[in-house]
Image (cartoon, rainbow, N blue to C red):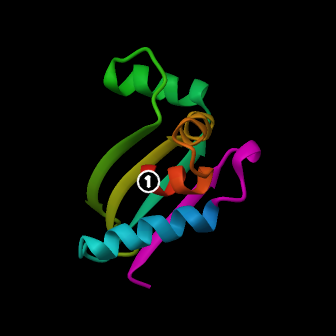
Amino acid sequence: MKYEIAVQADPDWSGSEELLRSAARHTLEHESAEEGSLTIVLTNQDAIRDLNRSFAGEDRPTDVLSFVDGTIDPESGRLYFGDIIIAADIARDQADEAEHTLSAELSLLT
């Protein structure tokens, strides 16, 4: 497997894991990214607000945060791209506003 994509979802937002893996894999392939792995976390606006405050100094929720890593995993020898954190409740509201599906919004944010 060229890309290893781990997905962690809060219980309220489980069920989108394969969609997120597919969106990430498609993007990595489109960009001709080297072999590697990444983690996608599906959470809520309160959790992402805490992360945004801690890591970006912004005391507000946002739809998505990304944390680039770029190190080599000593066990697998694979590049670790980093983490993508998505606030699913914000994504849902944005999908409603744009009049498209939550799946489309999650794919876009991924």
Q: Which residue sits furthest right?
A: 11
Q: Which of 58 and 95 is in front in this view?
A: 95
Query: Is residue 78 at least partly visible in the picture?
Result: no
In reply to whether residue 48 is colored magenta, the answer given is no
- The answer to whether 26 is drawn above or below residue 64 in the figure is below
- The answer to whether 75 is drawn above or below residue 1 in the figure is above
- All told, the count of numbered labels is 1
Counting from the top left corner in percent of width and height, residue 72 is at 28, 65
Q: Which residue sits furthest front?
A: 99
Query: Is residue 48 at least partly visible in the picture?
Result: yes
Counting from the top left corner in percent of width and height, residue 23 is at 47, 66
Quadrant position of the N terminus in the picture:
bottom left
Tell me the crowding category of disc 1: few under 14, some 14 to 19, or many 20 or more residues within 10 angstroms, Cα based.
few
The three-letter amino acid code for the residue at tag 1 is Leu
Residue at horizontal 45 percent and vertical 17 percent from the top: 60
What's drawn in magenta, residue-wise? 1-16
Q: In this view, does 12 lie to the left or right of 88?
A: right
- The answer to whether 9 is drawn above or below residue 28 in the figure is above
In reply to whether residue 2 is colored magenta, the answer given is yes
Quadrant position of the C terminus in the picture:
bottom left
Counting from the top left corner in percent of width and height, residue 106 is at 53, 52
Helix, strand or loop at label 1? It is helix
Residue at horizontal 61 percent and vertical 40 percent from the top: 92
Q: Look at mark 1 in the image and give the residue it sits on.
A: 108
Residue at horizontal 58 percent and vertical 28 percent from the top: 45
